[in-house]
Image: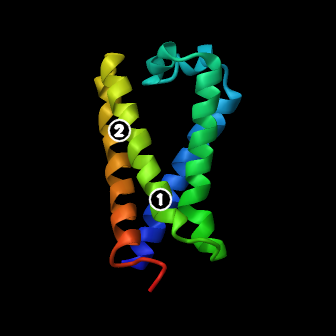
Amino acid sequence: MDVVLWIIAGLLAGAFFAGGVAKLLVPKDRLATFPGGGWVDRFSPGAVKALGVVDILAAVGLVLPAALDVAPVLVPLAAVGVVLLMTGAVVTRLRSHLPAAVPADLTYLVLAVVVAWGRFGPESFTG
């Protein structure tokens, strides 16, 4: 189970890091042209950049604390943060009339729930 949780956390981290970098480097107008990118119209350019920073912090929090064995309890906390972030993403996509993007968001949400459950519970870093 530990290996599965590492793999899921690594995949989530990769996805969130890539998404965060895109939000930081790609102009808002161009992000809106990406598939499912219509959500950016609801946010200012600064808010999109801030979400990019949050995505990168989530990616780092899902892997780095455990990899460095420095405050590994931050891993399940980061996973809970991803759950909250993806809950907001689902709501935003539905309000933006972008239901096609919701299954991917729900997939990330479920994977983050699995990491949070596993790292708080049976495969915690404290035992």
Quadrant where the image shows the C terminus? bottom left
Please name the residue that numbered disc 2 is placed on: 87
In screen coordinates, is 7 left or right of 27? Answer: left
Residue type at mark 2 is Thr
Residue type at mark 1 is Leu
Disc 2 vs disc 1: which is toward the camera?
Answer: 1
Mark positioned earlier in the residue sequence (2 or 1)? 1
Mark 2: few, some, or many residues within 10 Å (few <14, many ≥20)?
Answer: some
Q: Nearer the viewer, residue 76 or 10?
A: 76
Please name the residue that numbered disc 1 is placed on: 77
Indicate the position of residue 39 as horizontal and vertical percent values.
45, 20
Model colouring = rainbow
Q: Residue sitting at 61 percent across and 49 percent down? A: 57
Q: Which corner quadrant of the image does residue 47 belong to?
A: top right
In the displayed structure, would residue 9 be above or below residue 99?
below
Indicate the position of residue 10 as horizontal and vertical percent values.
52, 61
Q: Residue furthest bottom?
A: 127
Indicate the position of residue 38 as horizontal and vertical percent values.
45, 17
Q: Which corner quadrant of the image does residue 104 belong to?
A: top left
Q: Which corner quadrant of the image does residue 31 belong to?
A: top right
Quadrant where the image shows the N terminus? bottom left
Label 2 to label 1: alpha-carbon separation: 15 Å
In the displayed structure, would residue 44 be above or below residue 121?
above
